[in-house]
Image (tube, rainbow, N blue to C red):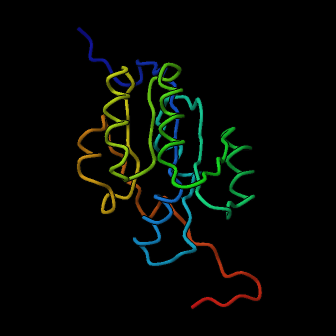
């Protein structure tokens, strides 16, 4: 019997990535003490996907200050969308995950929020692989335990914006 290598396996999985923007932004700001830090989707998304296909990327963001640049970039590179939320992203993200559960093999939730523990459990019960991507220190332990896999968001996955013209930075 010959040894099989991972090169012989064709992974045909479709993945949806749902981002709780406020939670992830708050986590990386806490982690490096800088409110101008942003997720670098160019490095993070390929790392999260591995050799799987991206079906959908939705970035949920509470509040009015949604970067037009982020929105355009997610759309042009990943056919992603940014969804403004009235209050927190919890309910809109949960609804979208439930809608997608019959259309994708895996859902990656980018959030460390314990409010998603029940959603993860529900999605797994529907036969969906559920992965969490978040900053480990700010992610609820039970959320990590409930998920099929945990991707730690590390400093290499973010960048800090430079000072605004005319603005002052410390």
Number of on-image labels:
0
Q: Residue at x 54, y 70 (%)?
A: 37
Q: Position of residue 19 (x, y in %)?
A: 52, 47
The C terminus lies in which quarter of the figure?
bottom right
* 97 up-or-down from 33: above or below: above
Determine whether 56 is above or below 82 in the image.
Answer: above
**Which x, y percent locates residue 26?**
47, 66
Q: Residue at x 49, y 33 (%)?
A: 97
- Seen as rendered, the residue at the extreme top is 1
In the picture, measured across the screen, residue 100 lies left or right of residue 144, that is: right
Q: Against 121, is 72 above or below?
A: below
Q: Which quadrant does the N terminus fall into? A: top left
> Observer-nearest residue: 163 or 121?
121
Q: Position of residue 157 (x, y in %)?
A: 48, 58
**Farthest front residue in view:** 86
Residue placed most toward the observer, 160 or 50: 160
Residue beneath the point at 47% across and 71% down: 29
Where residue 51 appears, as percent x and y from the top left, is: 48, 31
Q: Quadrant of residue 120?
A: top left
* In this picture, residue 70 sits left or right of residue 55: right
Left or right placement of residue 158 versus residue 32 in this view = right
Residue lying at 41% horizontally and 18% vertically, measured from the top left:
8
């Amino acid at each position: 019997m010959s040894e099989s290598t991972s090169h012989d396996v064709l992974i045909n999985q479709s993945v949806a990535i749902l981002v709780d923007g406020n939670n992830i932004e708050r986590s990386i700001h806490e982690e490096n003490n800088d409110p101008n830090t942003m997720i670098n989707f160019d490095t993070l998304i390929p790392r999260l996907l591995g050799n799987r296909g991206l079906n959908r990327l939705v970035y949920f963001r509470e509040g009015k200050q949604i970067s037009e640049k982020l929105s355009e970039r997610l759309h042009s590179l990943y056919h992603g969308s940014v969804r403004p939320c009235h209050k927190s992203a919890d309910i809109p993200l949960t609804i979208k995950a439930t809608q997608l559960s019959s259309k994708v093999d895996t859902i990656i939730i980018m959030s460390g929020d314990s409010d998603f523990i029940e959603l993860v459990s529900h999605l797994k019960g529907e036969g969906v692989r559920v992965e969490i991507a978040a900053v480990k220190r700010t992610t609820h332990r039970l959320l990590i335990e409930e998920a099929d896999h945990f991707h730690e968001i590390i400093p290499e996955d973010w960048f800090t914006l430079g000072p605004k013209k005319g603005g002052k930075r410390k």
